Amino acid sequence: MNAHIREDWESADAFEALMKTGESIRFGRRGFLKACAGAGGGLLLGAWLPAAAWADASVAGAHPGALVGLFVRIGRDGKIVIGARSPEIGQGVKTSLPMLIAEELDADWDMVSVEQLPLGLVFGGPPPGVAWKWGPQGAGGSTNIPDAWQELRQAGARARRMLLEAAAKRWDVPLDQLRTDKGRVLGADGRSLGYGELADAAAAIPVPTADVELKKPEAFRIIGTPRRVVDAEDIVTGKARYGIDTMAPGTLVAVIARCPLFEGGVKRFDATAALAIPGVRQVLPLPGPKGSEPITQNLVAGVAVLADDTWAALKGRKALKIEWESGGHDAESTQSLDAQCQRLLAGKGQVVRNDGDIDAVLKASDRLIEATYRVPFVAHAPLEPPGACVAIDKDSMRIVASMQMPGGASRMANAITGIDRSKIEVIMPRVGGGFGRRLSNDFVAEAVLLAKASGKPVKLMWTREDDLAHDFFRPFGQQHLSATLDGDGMPTSWRQHLASASKYHRRPDVKPEELWTAELYPDDFPAGIVKNLRVEWSAVHSGMTRGSWRAPAHTANAFAVESFIDEIAHAGKQDPLALRLKLLDHDTMDYGQHGGPKFSPRRLREVVRIVAEKIGWQRKLPKGHGLGIASHFTFGGYTAHAMEVSVGKDGIPVIHRCVCAVDVGQPVNPLGIEAQMMGGTIDGLSTAMDLEIRIDKGRITTGNFPDYPLLRSARAPDVEVHIVASRESPSGAGEMGIPTAAPALANAIFAACGIRIRRLPIGKQLVEAVHAKRA
Amino acid sequence: MAIEFVVNGKDMTFEGDPEMPLLWYLRDHAQTLGVKYGCGVGACGACTVHLDGGAVRSCSVPVSAAAGRKVTTIEGLAQGDTLHALQRAWIEEDVPQCGYCQAGQIMAAADLLARTPDPGDDEITALTNLCRCGTYPRIRKAIRRAAGLRKADEVKA
């Protein structure tokens, strides 16, 4: 459903277009099957990471063995190397995607190792003349598993077919008399050959071009079984390499002083003192976009210092004297944005969904409940900050960076330098966290611009302060929800009006009337269930740059909607669980946004039922404890959380138990899904508790982690994860753990102490409310 | 004046700026790239190394403070090919997600186990290293497992 071969969704922008339309584009066979001989334009620039010389076993460092199909290399010793195509940002695809291949290859997982593939593009062919060599290579929208589910199993099955054909030839027996078992081909007469003994012959057989029959799920031996992170040993011994770990002789380390004023620029600067610092080699102006024009390369203008090492570059930056130019947002502050939302919510918004007749129901009803919820700007803050290494050698280039969209990086580098894309090598090391920050390649653009201007290979470093001040932040917004209830406490109408700073701000090709599409997914619950329903949107104006933050608008909307459902239950004197079970007892419906084409309320109901049962919803609780529950459908996956919480006299919420249930269809790697749910839950809780990027006088005042207190171990609960056994086609799992964590916590806080959290982050408001209550 | 010290058992000499944070020396000069930058202000712990056996956040220690002392990074934690009990436990419990903070987490936990071979839950959760992926539940399990593994190793020895 999310398959896309189109080269043109690689950038965050076109990717968003896909997310927006839910457009389904069948994976083109041409790119997939094209023989992969000749890894384009290898550069000899320095001893950076060994380029994954995937198609050329003769290159030093490459695993010896024969290439069988596109992804599988088999050594004569039977050892198998599988190529992992997508960036590993912590979501586990370097393990789970090769599992799909290994399953259909019928490999012994203990004999498998995994290598990261570089960006693979095939040039020529029909417009646009560029196709993926190994299928889509990106990380975003939880699309890797659904994209790969058919394609990579086919890739494994076709490689297995080649091995079978090689054995059939060698033994001169019909193919249908042969079968495979854990890395061996077995004959009807008891003969057998290991894959290693057949590899060279199999490699010479043309890759099948027609679909090969896949295993029945009952026969899975790898899919659905827990498999550990393939790079675990490298990680725990310090050998794993991330973008930031790239270095080669002759490379200059660059840091940039970026304009801190929204949409501002550099008026003038003096580099004299910076250039006097030992090790500083060059100081270069870095132009940026003007005003609020679309961001297609770097985020903002600045001044770059290039030096022999990081410390010299940092000292040089500190010594710069820069006068910044205002971008005209000097009056903007966190308070001014809140006030703007209030003004907008008092009026009418752009209507984006309008079912039934809510005005008529409102007129006729005397039971109206309403509430306003708020979410702040937040940063991605991947622990490895942005950065990139770029070397340009006349008409070729190498990029090594932690990225989510390597194809977009290649296109951007081409746009900046004019170097042909076939001569731009893009290497993907492990990525120290993505969370959506690296869907944009602004940091790659900076490194390319500096490599071009300096004439040297450049390693661009961002500090944490740079990262928190220059991000594509999760949109800030407030939303007003109102509902009328019938005599049984069931909602008869529903109005949702969101005022937010759209993340599509400053995207090329997005029209003003489409800005809402990034903020509201109009088929989200309870659309189609509450028959009279209106959804409206109003634009908040802000100079902040915005973008996709893990599970984008679902984080804001699930917090509001799932909190409001709880408020409806209490207002209607219903059990919040009973209300949910009633509302979700509904037939499957169309879902037109990303994660569709269908939404099954009953699958969501089932995860609600599971968490309620596991947490013991009906049991008697210790005094001062409360239970909260929330559920949401995110990008094809169904998640619910239930939490048991108490609020101390100090106003600190304590989570005594945290239960999560998830239905992502057929689980591929349960160990990985559990990790994503634990991590997503903690990400959601961390963000709900204390995180906000604050603004004053048209600039960000949040500085470093002390101002942006991510949850530490002491407050991060254990998370009990229940994975639904399913044979449905799988969704991803990277983003489903977040949206329901905040509302489940807020609902549990209300149950525990009667204080309703409607503004995030919770921060000090609970402390203040507890004190006010006691006074 | 040259600063002399030992990194993972190797004698090192540094003649550059003595105020350079140990982190940048270890990454840019000693090439011990397992030591990670996360914040530069001692708040996240990604850069944790051992100085004479005790955990320090190397971004907040000048290289001059290492003079005459022994620095151990994640690359020097294993004894030859034998992984430290924490490294084994980390693999067993499948702790890493993105993996970026994990070397610092392990070095901080190794310091804890060296001081407190059988730590209680409070001591384990008191570790303040940040993990942006939220691997804390498995980190805690791995530390408990490692404490058990070390006991088992001692019995064998």
Image (cartoon, coloured by chain):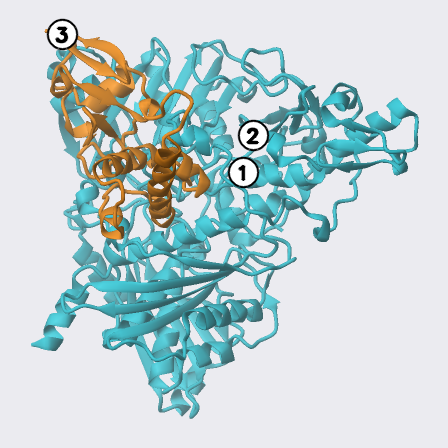
Chain colours: A cyan, B orange
Asked whether, in this view, residue A416 is left or right of residue A75, the answer is left
How far apart in space, not on screen, are marks 3 and 1 (Cα)? 46 Å
Residue under label 1: A95
Looking at the image, do the residues carrying marks 3 and 1 touch, with CB atoms under 8 Å apart? Answer: no
Q: Residues within 10 Å of mark 1 (few under 14, many from 20)?
A: many
Kindly identify the amino acid type of the residue bearing the numbered disc 2.
Val
Label drawn at residue A114: 2
Q: Residue at x 58, y 35 (%)?
A: A7
Question: What amino acid type is highlighted by mark number 1?
Answer: Thr
Q: Is residue A588 left or right of residue B142?
A: right
**Quarter where residue B36 is shown:** top left
Q: Examine the rendering and report whether any part of residue A445 can be seen.
A: no
What distance separates the C-alpha of mark 2 from that of mark 3?
43 Å
Q: Quadrant of residue A492?
A: bottom left
Residue A239 seen in this snapshot:
yes
- Indicate which disc residue B2 carries: 3
Task: Count neighbours of disc 2 (C-alpha within 10 A) and say few if under 14, some if 14 to 19, many if 20 or more.
Answer: some
Q: In the rendered image of this protein, does residue B151 appear above or below residue A620?
A: above
